[in-house]
């Protein structure tokens, strides 16, 4: 049988060296073309970086600093041509404002602050943030200004102190205006006279660069402009460039939830009570673990707020007094003192008690309702807990029952290894038991009861007692 005049033997003829070479070159060329194609495709994608948009809606605080810092880092790593901060804020903390301004002035990526949507404002701290941008833009119907200094909680300052604080704030905003080429006099009046301006007034006074109805309109007007960055002058190329929003990540959202004075207080108190339960009834483990977790979360939120360490000390004193109440008869002096310390601690835990501020900063306080409810709940729960762990076995003597008094000093034997918790047999009954931290008692060793905490015995090796 033949194909096109060729025999089967002809098809079996070995390929010559020249043919092998040509085949190798052809295959290599195909792979090279594919690689170059993918490479050019990747290059094309990398050259079409998107404009990153970060939304700052609310009080400017340390969480805002972290968010803007991450946004700028992400823009740097992605090679974004521009970062847009959409701003709507009543103000914020001075320290956080200074940090944000520093980040913006040192950025190698051009930054535009866009006060939007209509009805939004860049008040107080927002004025400084907008002024520090390479491009300050406002939507119609927005406002900017009113950055006069006030005391903590919004109270007016004495004349002399107000003048000193105002001068410092004026110097701050004047320096920003000089760097960004804005009208220093108009910006200073937002501090000295608490002046506020509409979008059109701000444009006429040279506070902002232009007005835009939406983000796309702003990008079209920015295209071709030059921005002075920390890395030098950059020509803005934002025509037909995609927009990518930078959402707050899980960690930022979680910390934002924890950074609430009411939540911080509840976490501190509930976590502290859980640890006290563990100390009062060792061996339960659950309350201790829960308490440690809650206290850790409380500290995370506390450190993100302008809190007072004095208030925190008062809360610790309250926990100490509650614990002392477990060793004394009756819910009286120590328990009442703990409630008073808890209420005072909640009052002084927050509240911007550091005196005057260069900006009308927000006041962080614990709600009186939350304070009262927490104090009442703690009192009820602690009384019930004390009665529960001390009520087994008959008439009580102080916080110790007659049965517990009889068990103290009794001998027994370990039914399991205590490292340091386990089980023992005392007075023909099996008990949960715990030794001192770091102490190991082996199964079968004799033990002595040195304390009774509800259904848990505090024990030691019997021979330790005999050596005393």
Image (cartoon, grey):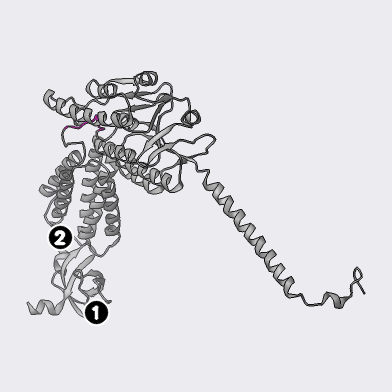
- What secondary structure is found at the residue carrying circle 2? strand
Q: Residues within 10 Å of mark 2 (few under 14, many from 20)?
A: many
Q: Which residues are magenta?
A: 356-362
- Image x and y of residue 82, in percent: 44, 38
Question: SS at mark 1?
Answer: loop
Rendered residue at 26%/36% (across/down): 93
Residue at 13% from the left image edge and 80% from the top image edge: 463
Residue 83 is at least partly visible in this image: no
Which residue is at 78% across, 77% downward? 14
Q: Reply yes or no: does residue 361 show up in magenta.
A: yes
Q: Is residue 457 magenta?
A: no
- Viewer-side residue, 94 vs 181: 181
Q: Is residue 27 visible?
A: yes
Q: Residues within 10 Å of mark 1 (few under 14, many from 20)?
A: some
Look at the image and tell me in which quarter the C terminus lies: bottom left
Q: Which residue is mark 1?
A: 442
Q: For the view shown, which residue lies furthest in the left direction? A: 468
Apparent side of residue 233 relative to residue 398 in the rendered image (left or right): right
Residue marked by disc 2: 400
Image marks 1 and 2: residues in contact by CB distance under 8 Å: no
Q: Is residue 318 above or below residue 347?
A: below
Q: Main secondary structure of the magenta part?
A: loop
């Amino acid at each position: 049988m033949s194909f096109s005049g060729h025999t089967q033997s002809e098809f079996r003829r070995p390929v010559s060296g020249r043919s092998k070479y040509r085949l190798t070159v052809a295959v290599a060329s195909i792979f090279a073309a594919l690689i170059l194609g993918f490479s050019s495709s990747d290059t094309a994608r990398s050259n079409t970086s998107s404009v990153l948009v970060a939304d700052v809606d609310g009080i400017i605080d340390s969480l805002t600093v972290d968010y803007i810092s991450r946004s700028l880092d992400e823009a740097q790593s992605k090679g974004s041509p521009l970062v847009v901060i959409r701003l709507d804020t009543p103000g914020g903390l001075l320290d956080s404002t200074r940090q944000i301004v520093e980040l913006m002035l040192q950025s190698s990526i051009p930054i535009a602050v866009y006060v939007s949507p209509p009805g939004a404002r860049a008040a107080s701290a927002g004025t400084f943030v907008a002024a520090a941008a390479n491009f300050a833009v406002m939507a119609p119907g927005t406002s900017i200004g009113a950055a006069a200094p006030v005391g903590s909680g919004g109270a007016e300052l004495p004349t002399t102190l107000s003048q000193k604080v105002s001068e410092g704030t004026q110097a701050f905003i004047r320096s920003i205006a000089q760097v960004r080429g804005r009208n220093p006099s108009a910006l200073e009046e937002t501090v000295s006279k608490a002046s506020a301006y509409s979008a059109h007034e701000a444009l006429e006074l040279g506070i902002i660069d232009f007005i835009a109805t939406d983000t796309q309109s702003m990008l079209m007007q920015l295209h071709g402009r030059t921005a002075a960055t920390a890395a030098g002058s950059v020509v803005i190329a934002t025509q037909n460039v995609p927009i990518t929003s930078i959402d707050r990540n899980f960690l930022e959202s979680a910390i934002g939830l924890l950074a609430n004075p009411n939540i911080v207080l509840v976490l501190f108190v509930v976590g502290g009570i859980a640890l006290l339960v563990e100390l009062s009834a060792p061996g339960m483990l659950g309350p201790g673990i829960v308490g440690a977790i809650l206290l850790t979360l409380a500290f995370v939120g506390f450190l993100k707020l302008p809190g007072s360490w004095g208030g925190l000390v008062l809360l610790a004193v309250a926990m100490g007094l509650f614990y002392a109440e477990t060793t004394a008869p009756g819910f009286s002096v120590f328990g009442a003192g703990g409630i008073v310390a808890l209420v005072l601690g909640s009052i002084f835990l927050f509240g911007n008690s550091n005196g005057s501020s260069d900006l009308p900063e927000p006041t962080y306080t614990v709600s009186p309702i939350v304070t009262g409810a927490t104090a009442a709940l703690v009192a009820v729960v602690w009384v019930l807990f004390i009665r529960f762990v001390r009520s087994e076995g008959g008439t009580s003597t102080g916080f110790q029952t007659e049965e517990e008094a009889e068990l103290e000093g009794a001998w027994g034997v370990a039914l399991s290894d205590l490292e340091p918790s386990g089980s023992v047999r005392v007075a023909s009954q099996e008990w949960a038991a715990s030794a001192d931290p770091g102490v190991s008692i082996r199964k079968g060793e004799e033990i002595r009861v040195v304390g009774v905490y509800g259904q848990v015995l505090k024990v030691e090796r019997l021979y330790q007692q005999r050596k005393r």
